[in-house]
Structures are given as C-alpha cells and as structure tokens.
C-alpha cells in the first residue's frame, strides 16, 4: 500500500540568491521542490528512507577568471541522512516553474515509484539486491526496470536480468532488454553488445516473427513466446499470426 504523501515543501526561495547559507533542517516530507537557476526547478520524491531527517544548505562563489569574471553561482543541496549504510530511492523531476508536475506514490514495499500525469503512468522498480515487488497490476523481479503506460503504447523494460509483467504482457530475460507493445506489433529491443540470449515474451494471442534472420528462432506455447536471439541483433519484431 502507498502511504499518504507528506506536504510538499519548497526551499531555496526564502534566502538571498547570492549568499552561503549554513545547513538547516527542512520540514519532514517525502516531496520537495528546489527553486533552481535558469528558470528550472527540481522536484524530489523520496521513496526511501522515509523517516530520516532532511537538511539543505547553500554554497557557491563568484568567479574571478575569464570569460565569466564576476558571474556568481550558488546551489542548494538536499541532504538525506541515515544512521548506517543503505540505499536511497529518490525520483528527480526537473521542470519549468509553470509546468504541471506529476503525482508520485510508493508501491511494493518501497521498491516501486509510481509517477502519473497527463503523459500517462510510469512504474519504476529499483533494488540494490535481487527482489520481488508488485502493485496495481505491475510485477517486477530482479534489480531494475520500468513500465511506461502511454496512450501511444506500452513499454516493459529490464535494466538487468529479471522479469517484468503488466496486465496481460510480460518480459523475462537474462540481461537488459525492452519490449514495446504497439497496436499491430511487439518490438523487443536489445543493447548493441549483447551475447546470444533467450527472451520470454508473454502476450495475448499468437505472434510470429516479422522478417527472417539467421539464427533467430521463435517457439510459441500458448501466450508464451520464447525467442532465441543471436548476438548483436538490436531489435526483433513480432506481428500478429
């Protein structure tokens, strides 16, 4: 279950721009907006840790060398503290001050950040060690992977060995890859330097290979489609059978 979000906190605008400011504690929250330079602000959503103090400070200088002699640059830091070693899971979203910003929530015992807005919905999974997490129809196993649910189509991806599923679609592989679900085809994408590999695609209906490539094979077992992909193949397209 996602916890109720804390109040959104804006910092960086309440002190003079060109001034070093000692560290001070921010109000406790999981959502902060840093007022930035060049008319760009940054939103931080902190999925974990959830109960540690948050501090900020400002540091900067005025340059004394050409071609920027006299130019001053000061930056605000967001400092998350914890008593021991551990991982931090934070979403960072830069935006214009007048832009609509997305909504954030934490799912899957802290392993999944849900980001939603006019663009659609993202589910982002990240873990320092192999883990399993699920929420709202999204399932992840491994260490890293996103789901993007857009009006234009669906994307399932893995940053490393693992499995990702969303509603009726799934992707399982021993290395990084992605699958785009489009109205008339499935496109599996791989990194340029991948070795010969096996990828399992789950999708409703029966699909077939679009185009022939030496060494590329497909086995269909119901809704499971097993691909054997030769080294160096960057994309595999499946069309309706």
Image (cartoon, rainbow, N blue to C red):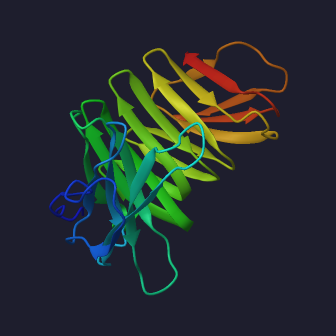
Task: Classify 35 as above or below 22.
Answer: above
Q: Residue at x 63, y 30 (%)?
A: 189
| 63 left or right of 195 in image | left
The N terminus: image quadrant: bottom left
Task: Classify 192 as above or below 113.
Answer: above
Q: Position of residue 151 (x, y in %)?
A: 32, 23
Find residue 88 and report its image quarter: bottom left
Residue 50 in sight from this viewpoint: no
Q: Nearer the viewer, residue 169 or 129?
A: 129
Q: Nearer the viewer, residue 33 or 86?
A: 33
Q: Nearer the viewer, residue 164 or 58?
A: 58
Find residue 213 and report its image quarter: top right
Residue 227 in sight from this viewpoint: yes
The C terminus: image quadrant: top right
**Tag count in the figure?**
0
Q: Nearer the viewer, residue 191 or 195?
A: 191
Q: Residue at x 29, y 78 (%)?
A: 51
Find residue 44 and report its image quarter: bottom left
Task: Classify 51 as above or below 2.
Answer: below
Q: Position of residue 240 (x, y in %)?
A: 52, 16
Q: Residue at x 21, y 72 (%)?
A: 28
Q: Position of residue 109 (x, y in %)?
A: 35, 68
């Amino acid at each position: 279950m996602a916890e109720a979000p804390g109040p959104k906190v804006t910092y960086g605008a309440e002190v003079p721009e060109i001034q070093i400011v000692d560290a001070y504690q921010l109000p406790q929250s999981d959502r902060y907006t840093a007022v930035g330079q060049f008319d760009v602000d940054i939103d931080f959503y902190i999925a974990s840790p959830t109960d540690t103090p948050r501090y900020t400070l400002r540091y900067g200088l005025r340059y004394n060398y050409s071609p920027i002699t006299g130019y001053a640059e000061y930056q605000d830091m967001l400092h998350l503290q914890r008593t021991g070693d551990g991982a931090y899971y934070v979403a960072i979203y830069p935006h214009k001050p007048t832009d609509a910003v997305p909504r954030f929530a934490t799912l899957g015992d802290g392993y999944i950040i849900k980001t939603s807005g006019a663009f659609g919905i993202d589910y982002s999974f990240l873990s320092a060690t192999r883990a399993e997490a699920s929420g709202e129809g999204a399932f992840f196993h491994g260490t890293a992977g996103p789901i993007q649910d857009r009006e234009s189509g669906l994307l399932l991806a893995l940053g490393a060995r693992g499995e990702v599923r969303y509603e009726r679609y799934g992707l399982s592989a021993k290395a990084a890859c992605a699958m785009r679900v489009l109205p008339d085809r499935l496109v599996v994408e791989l990194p340029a330097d991948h070795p010969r590999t096996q990828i399992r695609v789950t999708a409703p209906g029966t699909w077939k290979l679009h185009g022939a490539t030496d060494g590329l094979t497909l086995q269909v077992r119901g809704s499971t489609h097993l691909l054997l992909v030769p080294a160096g193949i960057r994309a595999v397209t499946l069309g309706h059978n």
